[in-house]
Image (spheres, rainbow, N blue to C red):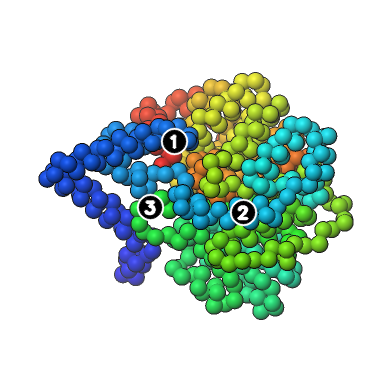
Amino acid sequence: MQKIKNIFFNRVVFVILAILIQLFAVIVMIWRFSNYFVIFDVVFAVISIFAMLYIINSRGDFAYKMPWIILILIFPIFGGLFYLMVGGTGLSGSMKKKMSQITDKMKEHLSQSQETMDLLQQESNIACNQARYIEKYSLCPVYDNSSTEFLPSGEDFFRELVNELKNAEKYIFLEFFIIEEGIMWNTILDILLDKVSKGVDVRLIYDDFGCISKLPSGYNKKMEQKGIKCCVFNPFIPILSLRLNNRDHRKIAVIDGNTAFTGGANLADEYINERKRFGHWRDCAIKIQGDAVWSLMVMFLSMWTFLRNTKEDYSKFMPIPSEDKSGCCGYVQPFDDSPLDDENVSEAVYLNLINQATKYIYIETPYLIADNKMMVALSLAAKRGVDVRILTPKIPDKKYAYAVTQSSYEELLESGVSIYQYTPGFNHGKTFVVDDDYAVVGTINLDYRSLYLHFECGVWMYKTSSVEQVKNSTLKALEQSEKITLKYVKSIPKVKRIFRSVLKIFAPLL
């Protein structure tokens, strides 16, 4: 009885039911009015025509436009209205204007050292061009005086994060997509409460959609009562709206301005294999120390001041630059990607790496739901002789995403791309490593939501010691993985392959 009660009073169930009721009400309303009043039929048809014209002529990837065009053609009365309600790829104009302060703060507090850029150009014009693009469109500079350490598992990330939290003396800033009560979060929370009692400034941001089934409603108020300042990104309201599309998918931890973390791992037990859901959970993170931490600090503070609707003196959080550069090597550039503009920074970073590769490209991603530009770039890289290897999960967390991922295999395999599935379980890492020179570690999946709709972050690295660490980690994982063959893909029943192909068309909407 208690289980049934928990199901019916669960926040997720309530939200789904509320949205379904609204959807049903809209359909019934349109259908009834159309039957009794021809004028309504004409009005909704006109709305659909204008919606289709807008979709065709708007900027954006055609892969996202196509499923909406198909839906409007199939449902000419309902399709256009639904697009206006939930179909936009980004934030509304008014919301972008409201959130522009995030970009303004980043412009104000981040600046590129010309000396660093000149040094990078002397080493590699190609690398310099990539860094210059990132700095121009994400507003985040490249640094030459920071150290990085790649953490090849969620357990490693958890251990390092706990050690740094225990040593915090001034402030702890955490921003995560998912937080769930359990061994991982409760351990961290105990440390945070201890630090709050000692006067440390502790702040927390979590995404409401990411935590909708993980945390109880009003959890932010509970944190505030304990002395932890807490904000919720985009509180999830059960209303059909464009607001549903944009989430804060970033994972950022900044401690005292000296150390920062980002990567795939959230703060929940499955990420450290204390809870088994999809076999062994493979994840990763990057630890940064030195001046590059400042970029992640500004990312957090710019989001914080927007959510809190308050002013902040960023300068009081800026650490004194260290003269010790013994652990520093190469170039480090944390970067931000957001739906506040029409520049898809993450996708451009990946495409630049793919197009410039001459030896190899090793990619880890939980979802391979790539658009045509990415598919062509990967295929051409393999055709020109680059060793392209992609690691995806063997055990999926979302069956529809797994099906769409597998629908991309045949085209890539025919071009010479090697695809592996992580046999022990679910691979959640998001990494690129290229030619022993470049690596990217971050929160960005190879899917439409990460590349176009979400707030994301990553760390671009050139000639750092962690590049080799990322490469070795991927190669080790490939040894535990199943290599997918073209023969295997073509042996899959045609009905299943057709279903996957259809699902792939609508993947941008999922």
> Mark 2 highlights which residue?
104
Q: Residue at x 74, y 31 (%)?
A: 126
Task: Give the SS element for disc 1.
Answer: loop
Locate residue 185: give its quadrant: bottom right
Q: Residue at x 66, y 33 (%)?
A: 353
**Which quarter of the rendering shows the C terminus?**
top left
Disc 1 to disc 2, C-alpha distance: 26 Å
- Which of the two residues, 371 or 128, is positioned nearer the viewer here? 128
Where residue 356 appears, as percent x and y from the top left, is: 68, 29
Image depth: mark 3 or mark 2 in front: 2
In the picture as drawn, the residue positioned furthest to the top comes out as 384
Locate residue 200: give its quadrant: bottom right
Is residue 508 visible to the viewer in this orientation of the structure? yes
Q: Residue at x 53, y 48 (%)?
A: 340
- Which of the two residues, 368 or 376, is positioned nearer the viewer here? 376
Q: Is 229 left or right of 359, judged from the image as shown?
A: left
Instruction: Tell which circle, 3 or 1, labels the residue nearer the N-terminal end.
Output: 1
> Mark 3 highlights which residue?
241
Where residue 138 appears, as percent x and y from the top left, is: 64, 45
Where residue 414 appears, as percent x and y from the top left, is: 53, 22
Instruction: Tell which circle, 3 or 2, labels the residue nearer the N-terminal end.
Output: 2
- Which of the two residues, 274 or 103, is positioned nearer the viewer here? 103
Instruction: Identify the amino acid type marked 1.
Output: Ser
* Disc number placed over residue 176 in the picture, else none: none
Q: Around disc 1, counting alpha carbons within 10 Å, would you say few (fewer than 14), some (14 to 19), or many (20 or more)?
A: few
Locate residue 344: give its quadrant: top right
Note whether 247 is above or below 37 in the view shown.
below
Pointers 3 and 1 in contact (C-beta within 8 Å): no
Is residue 366 visible to the viewer in this orientation of the structure? no
Instruction: Identify the amino acid type marked 3.
Output: Ser
Q: Is 334 left or right of 28, judged from the image as shown?
A: right
